[in-house]
Amino acid sequence: MFIILGAIGLVVISIAIWFKNEKKQDFLFIIGGLALLVYSLYIKNIIFVILQLVFIISSMAEIIKLNKK
């Protein structure tokens, strides 16, 4: 179950790279990042957990920045 969630997260992030709309791209980054965060918690890999948290926070900050424009 968690392996499938991790794979889905990876696929969502990979697809998001091809989006031209930055808000949609960042939203997909957050969704994929959350899925990978759950997987990284499941495998108990602290480095991966930290990486995913930074990735998710960065994507959220980018959405906030885009909304202020």
Image: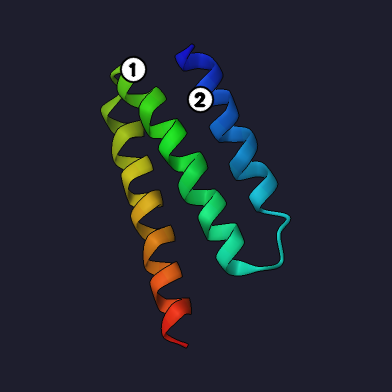
Image point 59% across, 29% down: which residue? 8
Q: Is residue 39 left or right of residue 19?
A: left
Identity of the residue furthest to the top in this view? 1
Q: Residues within 10 Å of mark 1 (few under 14, many from 20)?
A: few
* Foreground of the two, 24 or 55: 24
Image x and y of residue 48, in percent? 36, 32
Closer to the N terminus: mark 1 or mark 2? 2
Q: Considering only vertical position in the picture, is 14 above or below 45? A: below
According to the picture, the residue beneath numbered tag 2 turns out to be: 6
Image x and y of residue 68, in percent? 41, 84
Q: Give the residue type that dot 1 points to.
A: Tyr
Image x and y of residue 60, in percent? 39, 61
| Residue 50 lies in quadrant | top left
Image point 49% across, 11% down: which residue? 1
Q: Is residue 30 left or right of residue 46?
A: right
Secondary element type, mark 1: helix
Q: Is residue 47 left or right of residue 8?
A: left
Image x and y of residue 65, in percent? 41, 77
Find out whether the residues at labels 1 and 2 contact each other: C-beta distance under 8 Å: yes
According to the picture, the residue beneath numbered tag 1 turns out to be: 42
The structure's colour scheme is rainbow
Q: Residues within 10 Å of mark 2 (few under 14, many from 20)?
A: many
| Residue 51 lies in quadrant | top left
| Residue 39 lies in quadrant | top left
Q: Give the residue type that dot 2 points to.
A: Gly
Image point 51% across, 15% down: which residue? 3
Q: Considering only vertical position in the picture, is 15 above or below 48? A: below
Q: Which mark is residue 10?
A: none
Secondary element type, mark 2: helix
